[in-house]
Image (cartoon, grey):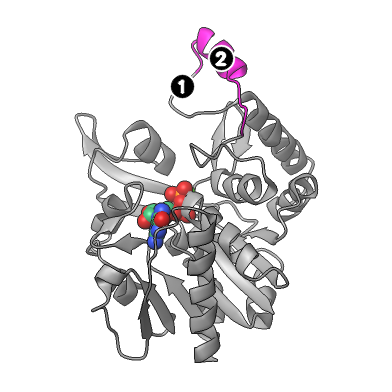
């Protein structure tokens, strides 16, 4: 079986681990979000690609959900001693090596998709991980404060401000010119099923869907989504702040309507959201808390079962 999954960071990566164990023989292609990417200290950082790669490759900090296990922060401390900014983004020593390799390869002319493949040679994530695009895009957030109305990088809003200033707009800069990376559309076309994990519907899945050609390719397939919203709240994190910014209520129903029946064929909701319904979509209620690997694998199995009923 050939499965395509879109993915953001933590929510996507955890779900993918469950998907791998639910479908050990499947060929899984993951289309990763690069809207979170940022240049720091001259280094290109791809947080969501790395979270997927480290999580599936066994290098993740399990507690935190991102970054490397057994990490130290000597380089960060030394940079801070020079007064280098920003100091609000967590970069560990082990993680720095990944960004050095990425930046060096990009500088030598390799596209991000080939760089990601090279990094995955070490981590062997057991899936094919492709960035949504080789073209540079960045999610920016429009906020207003004492300095007036301005756009800041998504990471500054999310990590430094903890989404404390309301987002007036969330814009994927570069979206108009971004083409899907090589292999993305082909993988979708060849897929037996497409799964949307419970990643952030705005700044993870929503970003990937903005790359021209991806949504169009997906609408032709059987797509099953897993709701990231349970009982009116994001399970972890601040996805509600992103949904509010685009005028979507924080509920499993509203996220489904936002994705639309043209995209979604099956929608997994938590048991407390069993009333969710939309014409043209089969909705199934299951426990959706990724509390441990077994529970997560059960969610993935439910998604695959639902896809099986629909095809
Ligand atoms: P990020 O890029 O690291 O923010 O990660 P993602 O975009 O991949 O996933 C973040 C989303 O995962 C959050 O907005 C939550 O709504 C969702 N999420 C986290 N844990 C769970 C869980 O246990 N169950 C479900 N259904 N969703 C979850
Ligand atoms: Ca992310």
Tell me the crowding category of disc 2: few under 14, some 14 to 19, or many 20 or more residues within 10 angstroms, Cα based.
some
Identify the mark at residue 79; answer none if there is no mark: 2
Span of residues in magenta: 69-84
Identify the mark at residue 87; answer none if there is no mark: 1
> Relative to 281, is 215 above or below?
above
Tell me the crowding category of disc 1: few under 14, some 14 to 19, or many 20 or more residues within 10 angstroms, Cα based.
some
Q: Position of residue 248 (x, y in %)?
A: 25, 64
What is the secondary structure assignment of the residue under circle 1? loop
Q: Residue furthest left?
A: 146
Is residue 73 a member of the stretch shown in magenta?
yes
Q: Earlier in the sequence, mark 1 or mark 2?
A: 2
Residue at 54 percent of width and 78 percent of height: 304
Taking the image as shown, residue 126 lies to the left or right of residue 67, namely: right
Residue at 25 percent of width and 65 percent of height: 251
Marks 1,2: beta carbons within 8 A = yes
Q: Is residue 258 visible?
A: yes
Residue 289 falls in image quadrant: bottom left
Ligand 1 shows up in which quadrant of the image? bottom left
Q: Nearer the viewer, residue 191 or 306?
A: 306
Q: For the N terminus, which image quadrant?
A: bottom right
Residue at 40 percent of width and 47 percent of height: 140
Q: Nearer the viewer, residue 237 or 290?
A: 290
- Mark 1 to mark 2 CA distance (whole Å): 8 Å
């Amino acid at each position: 079986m050939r499965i395509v999954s879109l993915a953001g960071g933590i929510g996507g990566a955890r779900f993918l681990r469950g998907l791998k164990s639910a479908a050990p023989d499947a060929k899984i292609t993951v289309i990763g979000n690069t809207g979170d990417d940022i240049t720091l200290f001259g280094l290109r950082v791809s947080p969501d690609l790395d979270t997927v790669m480290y999580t599936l490759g066994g290098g993740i900090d399990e507690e935190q959900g991102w970054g490397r296990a057994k990490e130290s922060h000597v380089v960060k401390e030394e940079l801070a001693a020079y007064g280098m900014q920003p100091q609000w983004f967590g970069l560990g020593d082990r993680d720095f090596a990944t960004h050095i390799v990425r930046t060096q390869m990009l500088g030598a002319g390799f596209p991000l998709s080939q760089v990601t493949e090279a990094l995955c040679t070490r981590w062997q994530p057991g899936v094919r991980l492709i960035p949504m695009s080789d073209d540079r895009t960045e999610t920016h957030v429009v906020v207003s404060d004492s300095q007036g109305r301005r756009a800041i990088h998504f990471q500054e809003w999310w990590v430094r401000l903890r989404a404390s200033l309301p987002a007036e707009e969330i814009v994927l800069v570069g979206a108009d010119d971004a083409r899907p990376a090589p292999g993305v559309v082909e993988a979708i076309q060849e897929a037996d099923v497409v799964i949307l994990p419970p990643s952030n519907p705005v700044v993870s899945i929503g970003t990937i869907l903005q790359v021209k050609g991806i949504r169009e390719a997906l609408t032709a397939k059987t797509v099953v989504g897993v709701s990231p919203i349970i009982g009116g709240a994001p399970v972890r994190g601040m996805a509600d702040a992103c949904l509010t910014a685009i005028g979507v209520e924080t509920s499993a129903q509203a996220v489904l309507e936002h994705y639309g029946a043209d995209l979604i064929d099956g929608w997994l909701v938590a048991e407390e959201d069993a009333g969710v319904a939309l014409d043209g979509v089969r909705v199934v209620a299951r426990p959706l808390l990724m509390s441990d690997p077994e529970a997560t694998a059960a969610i993935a199995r439910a998604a695959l079962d639902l896809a099986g009923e629909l095809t």
